[in-house]
């Protein structure tokens, strides 16, 4: 979120709508041209705003880029926050995996933009990774460890389980071109088979 928006006690409906228009436009532009190849003018034009109007919300291109990445992370982290220590591990983990796969199906551009930032060292969002993301991951790894200690899951390293879930689900967004070349199924059928396969492998591999 922009500094100006954060500093406001209460944003108007128009401000909220304009910020969302900027985020949607920026995702399209950054995912098409990359960070270096994108301009504020391109984003403003796609958002249907004047450049001065856009700069009211975000002072420079980097601010917009970081906001898009943090917005993406927020969407992806939401399903992880729902991992409930009181629930059944198989159901809880599968719900999370299924949500992650659906995000890869419905929002592939956001996933690819994030992957590109990781490949370039994540300099723009390193504080977010070491702060909010790390705290949430440590908390949910603790939940998984409780299930392991109770004998409800096989003894594995929780953080590496999360890495595996991210790798297998986000693969369908980040390597979309490869999947289209190698998988003969239609898109919905492909994701259906992916869901069945991941459920079998993860749950059979995790449950005692």
Image (cartoon, rainbow, N blue to C red):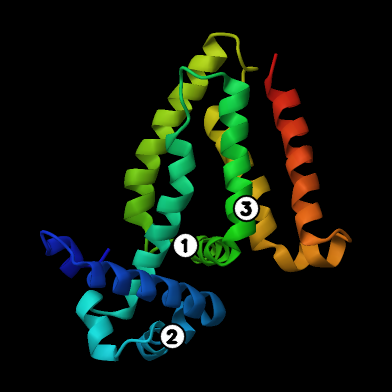
Q: Nearer the viewer, mark 3 or mark 1?
A: 3
Q: Nearer the viewer, mark 2 or mark 1?
A: 2
Q: Distance of mark 3 from mark 2, alpha carbons? A: 27 Å
Q: Secondary structure at mark 3?
A: helix
Residue 63: in sight, yes or no?
no
The quadrant in which the N terminus is found is bottom left
- State which tag comes first along the sequence, 3 or 1: 1
The quadrant in which the C terminus is found is top right
Q: Which residue is mark 3?
A: 170
- Residue appearing at x 23%, y 89% in the figure: 52
At which x and y percent is residue 105?
64, 57
60 relative to 89 in the view: left or right: left
Q: Secondary structure at mark 2?
A: helix
Q: Which residue is mark 2?
A: 46
194 relative to 23 in the view: left or right: right
Q: Secondary structure at mark 1?
A: loop
Marking on residue 121: 1
Q: Between 90 and 12, which is closer to the camera in this rendering?
A: 12
Q: Distance of mark 2 from mark 1, alpha carbons? A: 28 Å
At which x and y percent is residue 46?
43, 85
At which x and y percent is residue 179?
78, 61
Q: Between 15 and 69, which is closer to the camera in this rendering?
A: 15
Q: Residues within 10 Å of mark 2 (few under 14, many from 20)?
A: some
Depicted 35 relative to depicted 192: above or below: below
At which x and y percent is residue 94?
63, 32
192 relative to 24 in the view: left or right: right
Q: Are marks 3 and 1 in contact (CB under 8 Å)?
A: no
């Amino acid at each position: 979120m922009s500094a100006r928006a954060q500093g406001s006690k209460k944003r108007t409906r128009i401000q909220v709508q304009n910020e969302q228009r900027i985020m949607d436009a920026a995702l399209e532009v950054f995912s098409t041209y990359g960070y270096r190849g994108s301009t504020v003018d391109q984003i403003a034009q796609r958002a249907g705003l004047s450049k001065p109007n856009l700069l009211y919300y975000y002072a420079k291109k980097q601010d917009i880029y970081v906001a898009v990445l943090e917005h993406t992370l927020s969407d992806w982290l939401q399903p992880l926050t729902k991992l409930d220590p009181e629930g059944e591990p198989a159901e809880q983990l599968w719900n999370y995996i299924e949500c992650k796969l659906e995000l890869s199906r419905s929002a592939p551009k956001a996933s690819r933009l994030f992957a590109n930032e990781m490949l370039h060292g994540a300099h723009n969002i390193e504080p977010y990774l070491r702060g909010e993301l790390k705290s949430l991951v440590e908390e949910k790894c603790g939940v998984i460890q409780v299930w392991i200690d109770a004998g409800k899951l096989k003894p594995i390293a929780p953080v590496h389980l999360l890495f595996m879930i991210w790798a297998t689900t986000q693969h369908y967004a980040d390597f979309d071109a490869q999947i289209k070349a190698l998988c003969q199924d239609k898109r919905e059928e492909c994701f259906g088979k992916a869901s069945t396969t991941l459920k079998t492998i993860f749950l059979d591999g995790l449950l005692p």
